Image (cartoon, coloured by chain):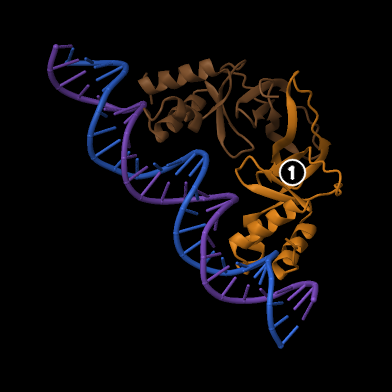
Chain colours: A orange, B brown, C purple, D blue
Amino acid sequence: MKRRNTPAKSTIMTLLKSAESALSQDMIEEKVKGDMDRVTIYRVLNSFCEDGITHKILADNGKYYFALCDSCNDEVHNHDHFHFRCTKCEKVECLDEQVTIKLPDGYVMKSINSWVTGECKNCS
Amino acid sequence: MKRRNTPAKSTIMTLLKSAESALSQDMIEEKVKGDMDRVTIYRVLNSFCEDGITHKILADNGKYYFALCDSCNDEVHNHDHFHFRCTKCEKVECLDEQVTIKLPDGYVMKSINSWVTGECKNCS
DNA sequence: TAATTTATCGCAACAAAATTGCATTAGTAA
DNA sequence: TTACTAATGCAATTTTGTTGCGATAAATTA
């Protein structure tokens, strides 16, 4: 399965890069104003995740958000940071702070999904 | 609105007490084997939350889980602990460890939702 | 005990988010 | 330019949870 470059992909990539925050499907749909089908947006975003370009996080509002991988490379992926969702402007950001937890004996960690909800610095 | 005691409520309460872990609607539906309508289960669980008997958490698999409030009382509710979901047995537990995070300046925290996914001590 | 009130229940319908099937379109390499 | 097949758009489906409403049954009162 070799990827192809398409208008949809480059448009969405441009949006992700300029957003400086994580985007959900409906945010992207609104920005492209119906130029792109909902399904296409989902498929492009998921293909980015498969390729390790973005990471996908389920927020505590039930929606998936997609963010460009910042310090990840082909070998090392680390998405164990906190995510912040502003309840006023609905912006979602990756926070610098890493999630640290010591699991009880016998537990094996596979992934972390940590959210803080509140008001961001522009809204508080 | 005065609550009434019903078979549905006591059945679900018994399940929650004996589970020693958080339960989702579909887990309860399976345990009562169709004796209870989906909607009834949701309504009972949500009424428990309104009454402060349980807390409701959206897991990183997109489902809501309900757990008995452990050390909460009428005045103080604290649900800022980590939650663990086992990908093998699908059991969900509240971990003792509290989530701690220092937000950047200007950010106001309203709620926290932290999940660790992996294998529990019975499955690893 | 019987009557009354209304919380609760079950069923159908709805809603939101995301996925799948399939015919069509369009990158890309030869 | 042609051939191959990834990507797209549309319709339909799936999953999870909620709402509306008439019927049922707790709890209170007579």
Q: Is residue A71 above or below residue B29?
A: below
At horizontal 41% and vertical 22% (from top left) the residue drawn is B9
At horizontal 74% and vertical 20% (from top left) the residue drawn is A106
Residue A83 position, x and y percent, is 74, 41
At horizontal 76% and vertical 23% (from top left) the residue drawn is A103
Few, some or many residues within 10 Å of mark 1 (<14, 14–19, 20+): many
Q: Quadrant of the N terminus of chain A?
A: bottom right
Residue A94 position, x and y percent, is 78, 44
Residue named by callout 1: A120
Visible residue check, residue B13 = yes
Residue D2 position, x and y percent, is 69, 83
Q: Foreground residue, A17 or A9?
A: A9
Q: Is residue B40 above or below residue A40?
A: above
Q: Quadrant of the C terminus of chain A?
A: top right
Please give the count of numbered marks on the rendered protein.
1
What chain is tagged by disc 1?
Answer: A
Q: Foreground residue, A37 or B88?
A: B88
